[in-house]
Protein backbone atom coordinates (compact mmCIF):
# COMPACT_ATOMS: atom_id res chain seq x y z
CA UNK A 1 0.00 0.00 0.00
CA UNK A 2 1.26 3.44 -0.94
CA UNK A 3 1.49 5.91 1.90
CA UNK A 4 0.57 9.42 0.83
CA UNK A 5 2.39 12.49 2.01
CA UNK A 6 0.50 14.50 4.59
CA UNK A 7 -0.45 17.22 2.09
CA UNK A 8 -1.56 14.65 -0.50
CA UNK A 9 -3.68 12.83 2.09
CA UNK A 10 -5.19 16.15 3.20
CA UNK A 11 -6.02 17.02 -0.44
CA UNK A 12 -7.64 13.63 -1.00
CA UNK A 13 -9.74 14.07 2.15
CA UNK A 14 -10.82 17.57 1.08
CA UNK A 15 -11.70 16.29 -2.38
CA UNK A 16 -13.85 13.51 -0.88
CA UNK A 17 -15.70 15.96 1.39
CA UNK A 18 -16.23 18.42 -1.47
CA UNK A 19 -17.36 15.67 -3.86
CA UNK A 20 -19.97 14.42 -1.40
CA UNK A 21 -21.38 17.92 -1.01
CA UNK A 22 -21.33 18.85 -4.71
CA UNK A 23 -22.60 15.49 -5.98
CA UNK A 24 -25.47 15.41 -3.44
CA UNK A 25 -26.54 18.94 -4.37
CA UNK A 26 -25.94 18.88 -8.14
CA UNK A 27 -25.73 15.23 -9.15
CA UNK A 28 -22.89 12.99 -10.20
CA UNK A 29 -22.54 14.88 -13.49
CA UNK A 30 -21.63 18.14 -11.73
CA UNK A 31 -18.48 19.68 -13.24
CA UNK A 32 -15.30 18.48 -11.56
CA UNK A 33 -14.25 22.14 -11.53
CA UNK A 34 -16.95 22.68 -8.88
CA UNK A 35 -15.57 19.84 -6.79
CA UNK A 36 -12.05 21.21 -7.19
CA UNK A 37 -13.15 24.72 -6.21
CA UNK A 38 -15.01 23.43 -3.15
CA UNK A 39 -11.94 21.39 -2.14
CA UNK A 40 -9.61 24.30 -2.89
CA UNK A 41 -7.47 22.18 -5.22
CA UNK A 42 -6.94 22.08 -8.96
CA UNK A 43 -8.93 19.77 -11.22
CA UNK A 44 -5.60 18.08 -12.02
CA UNK A 45 -5.25 17.18 -8.34
CA UNK A 46 -8.55 15.29 -8.55
CA UNK A 47 -7.18 13.28 -11.48
CA UNK A 48 -3.87 12.72 -9.69
CA UNK A 49 -5.55 11.45 -6.53
CA UNK A 50 -8.53 9.60 -8.02
CA UNK A 51 -7.82 9.03 -11.70
CA UNK A 52 -11.02 10.71 -12.88
CA UNK A 53 -14.74 11.06 -12.29
CA UNK A 54 -15.69 7.37 -12.10
CA UNK A 55 -13.09 6.51 -9.49
CA UNK A 56 -14.05 9.64 -7.52
CA UNK A 57 -17.70 8.56 -7.69
CA UNK A 58 -16.73 5.09 -6.47
CA UNK A 59 -14.78 6.66 -3.59
CA UNK A 60 -17.74 8.68 -2.34
CA UNK A 61 -20.86 6.87 -3.66
CA UNK A 62 -21.75 5.42 -0.29
CA UNK A 63 -21.70 8.84 1.37
CA UNK A 64 -23.41 10.56 -1.54
CA UNK A 65 -26.34 8.23 -2.05
CA UNK A 66 -25.75 4.46 -1.75
CA UNK A 67 -26.24 4.22 2.01
CA UNK A 68 -29.47 6.19 1.80
CA UNK A 69 -30.80 4.13 -1.11
CA UNK A 70 -30.01 0.88 0.69
CA UNK A 71 -31.79 2.28 3.75
CA UNK A 72 -34.90 3.01 1.66
CA UNK A 73 -34.93 -0.63 0.51
CA UNK A 74 -34.23 -1.99 4.01
CA UNK A 75 -36.94 0.20 5.54
CA UNK A 76 -39.44 -1.02 2.95
CA UNK A 77 -38.47 -4.65 3.59
CA UNK A 78 -39.35 -4.15 7.25
CA UNK A 79 -42.97 -3.28 6.37
CA UNK A 80 -44.97 -6.48 6.75
CA UNK A 81 -48.12 -5.77 4.73
CA UNK A 82 -47.35 -5.66 0.99
CA UNK A 83 -49.66 -2.75 0.09
CA UNK A 84 -48.03 -0.62 2.78
CA UNK A 85 -44.57 -1.86 1.72
CA UNK A 86 -45.16 -0.79 -1.89
CA UNK A 87 -46.61 2.57 -0.90
CA UNK A 88 -43.82 3.19 1.61
CA UNK A 89 -41.09 2.25 -0.85
CA UNK A 90 -42.45 4.22 -3.81
CA UNK A 91 -42.99 7.27 -1.58
CA UNK A 92 -39.50 7.03 -0.07
CA UNK A 93 -37.83 6.45 -3.44
CA UNK A 94 -39.61 9.40 -5.03
CA UNK A 95 -38.73 11.51 -1.98
CA UNK A 96 -35.01 10.79 -2.29
CA UNK A 97 -35.19 11.37 -6.05
CA UNK A 98 -36.56 14.83 -5.33
CA UNK A 99 -34.09 15.68 -2.55
CA UNK A 100 -30.82 14.20 -3.87
CA UNK A 101 -30.11 14.77 -7.58
CA UNK A 102 -27.35 12.13 -7.54
CA UNK A 103 -30.02 9.46 -7.06
CA UNK A 104 -31.36 10.20 -10.52
CA UNK A 105 -27.88 9.76 -12.02
CA UNK A 106 -27.70 6.36 -10.32
CA UNK A 107 -31.15 5.33 -11.56
CA UNK A 108 -30.33 6.53 -15.07
CA UNK A 109 -27.07 4.56 -14.93
CA UNK A 110 -25.20 7.66 -16.08
CA UNK A 111 -21.83 6.12 -15.23
CA UNK A 112 -21.94 2.47 -16.31
CA UNK A 113 -18.18 2.11 -15.74
CA UNK A 114 -18.77 2.49 -12.01
CA UNK A 115 -19.12 -1.04 -10.67
CA UNK A 116 -20.54 0.23 -7.38
CA UNK A 117 -23.17 2.34 -9.12
CA UNK A 118 -24.21 -0.56 -11.34
CA UNK A 119 -24.34 -2.96 -8.37
CA UNK A 120 -26.66 -0.50 -6.62
CA UNK A 121 -28.88 -0.40 -9.72
CA UNK A 122 -29.03 -4.19 -9.90
CA UNK A 123 -29.95 -4.45 -6.20
CA UNK A 124 -32.74 -1.90 -6.70
CA UNK A 125 -33.98 -3.69 -9.81
CA UNK A 126 -34.12 -7.02 -7.97
CA UNK A 127 -36.09 -5.39 -5.17
CA UNK A 128 -38.53 -3.90 -7.71
CA UNK A 129 -39.02 -7.37 -9.21
CA UNK A 130 -39.75 -8.82 -5.76
CA UNK A 131 -42.22 -6.04 -4.93
CA UNK A 132 -44.13 -6.56 -8.14
CA UNK A 133 -44.24 -10.35 -7.71
CA UNK A 134 -45.43 -10.06 -4.12
CA UNK A 135 -47.89 -7.30 -5.03
CA UNK A 136 -49.44 -9.48 -7.73
CA UNK A 137 -49.53 -12.55 -5.48
CA UNK A 138 -51.42 -10.55 -2.86
CA UNK A 139 -53.73 -8.93 -5.44
CA UNK A 140 -52.51 -5.47 -4.44
CA UNK A 141 -51.12 -4.34 -7.80
CA UNK A 142 -53.19 -3.97 -10.93
CA UNK A 143 -52.66 -7.09 -13.04
CA UNK A 144 -51.22 -5.20 -16.01
CA UNK A 145 -48.42 -3.64 -13.92
CA UNK A 146 -45.06 -5.31 -14.64
CA UNK A 147 -41.50 -4.99 -13.32
CA UNK A 148 -40.69 -3.15 -16.57
CA UNK A 149 -43.46 -0.67 -15.76
CA UNK A 150 -41.98 -0.14 -12.29
CA UNK A 151 -38.58 0.52 -13.87
CA UNK A 152 -40.09 2.86 -16.46
CA UNK A 153 -41.91 4.91 -13.80
CA UNK A 154 -38.67 5.27 -11.86
CA UNK A 155 -36.67 6.24 -14.96
CA UNK A 156 -39.36 8.62 -16.20
CA UNK A 157 -39.32 10.37 -12.85
CA UNK A 158 -35.51 10.56 -12.87
CA UNK A 159 -35.52 12.06 -16.38
CA UNK A 160 -38.22 14.59 -15.48
CA UNK A 161 -36.36 15.71 -12.37
CA UNK A 162 -32.98 15.86 -14.07
CA UNK A 163 -33.96 17.51 -17.34
CA UNK A 164 -37.43 18.97 -16.83
CA UNK A 165 -38.87 21.88 -14.93
CA UNK A 166 -38.67 21.05 -11.23
CA UNK A 167 -42.17 21.04 -9.69
CA UNK A 168 -42.94 22.46 -6.28
CA UNK A 169 -42.73 19.91 -3.50
CA UNK A 170 -46.51 19.97 -2.99
CA UNK A 171 -47.16 19.29 -6.70
CA UNK A 172 -44.55 16.53 -6.68
CA UNK A 173 -46.11 14.85 -3.63
CA UNK A 174 -49.57 15.13 -5.19
CA UNK A 175 -48.25 13.41 -8.33
CA UNK A 176 -46.67 10.69 -6.21
CA UNK A 177 -50.16 9.96 -4.84
CA UNK A 178 -51.44 9.71 -8.44
CA UNK A 179 -48.71 7.18 -9.25
CA UNK A 180 -49.54 5.07 -6.21
CA UNK A 181 -53.27 5.24 -6.80
CA UNK A 182 -52.70 4.20 -10.41
CA UNK A 183 -50.64 1.08 -9.73
CA UNK A 184 -52.33 -0.16 -6.56
CA UNK A 185 -55.77 -1.68 -6.65
CA UNK A 186 -58.31 -0.03 -4.44
CA UNK A 187 -58.84 -1.80 -1.13
CA UNK A 188 -62.38 -2.79 -2.19
CA UNK A 189 -61.27 -4.37 -5.52
CA UNK A 190 -58.44 -6.37 -3.95
CA UNK A 191 -60.68 -7.99 -1.34
Image: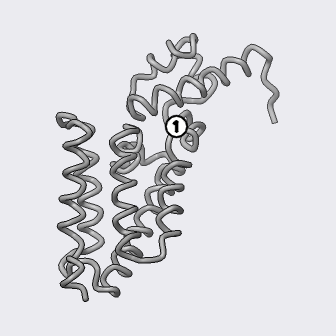
* Coloring applied to the structure: one colour
Vertical order, 56 against 8 (above or below):
below
| Drawn side of residue 64 relative to residue 94, left or right | right
Q: How many marks?
A: 1
In the image, is residue 39 above or below residue 142? Answer: above
State the residue position of label 1: 57
**Residue at 30% in and 83% down:** 136
Label 1, residues with CA under 10 Å away: few <14, some 14-19, many ≥20: many
Give the residue furthest to the front: 188
Which image quadrant for residue 141? bottom left
Q: Looking at the figure, which quarter contains the N terminus?
A: top right
Q: Residue at x 34, y 65 (%)?
A: 87
Nearer-the-camera pick, 55 or 11: 11
Residue at the image point whose x is 17% and y is 67% from the top = 182
- Could you say where residue 130 lies in the image, as x and y percent from the top left? 41, 75
Residue 85 or 47: which is nearer the viewer?
Answer: 85
Report x, y in % for residue 13.
67, 24
Q: Position of residue 52 (x, y in %)?
A: 52, 29
Give the x, y percent position of residue 38. Answer: 52, 15
Q: Quadrant of residue 51?
A: top right
Which of these two is toward me, 165 or 182? Answer: 182
Q: Residue at x 54, y 41 (%)?
A: 61
Task: Using residue 75 as the reference point, say whether residue 84 is left or right of it.
Answer: left
Q: Secondary structure at mark 1?
A: helix
Compared with 138, 120 (above or below) is: above
* Image quadrant where one finds the C terminus: bottom left
Amino acid sequence: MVTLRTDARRNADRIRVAAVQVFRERGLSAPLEEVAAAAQVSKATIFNRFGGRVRLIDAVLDDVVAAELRSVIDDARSVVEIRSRIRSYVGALRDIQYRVPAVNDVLLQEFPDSEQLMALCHAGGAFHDDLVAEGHAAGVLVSEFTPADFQALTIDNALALKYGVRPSRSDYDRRTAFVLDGICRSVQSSA
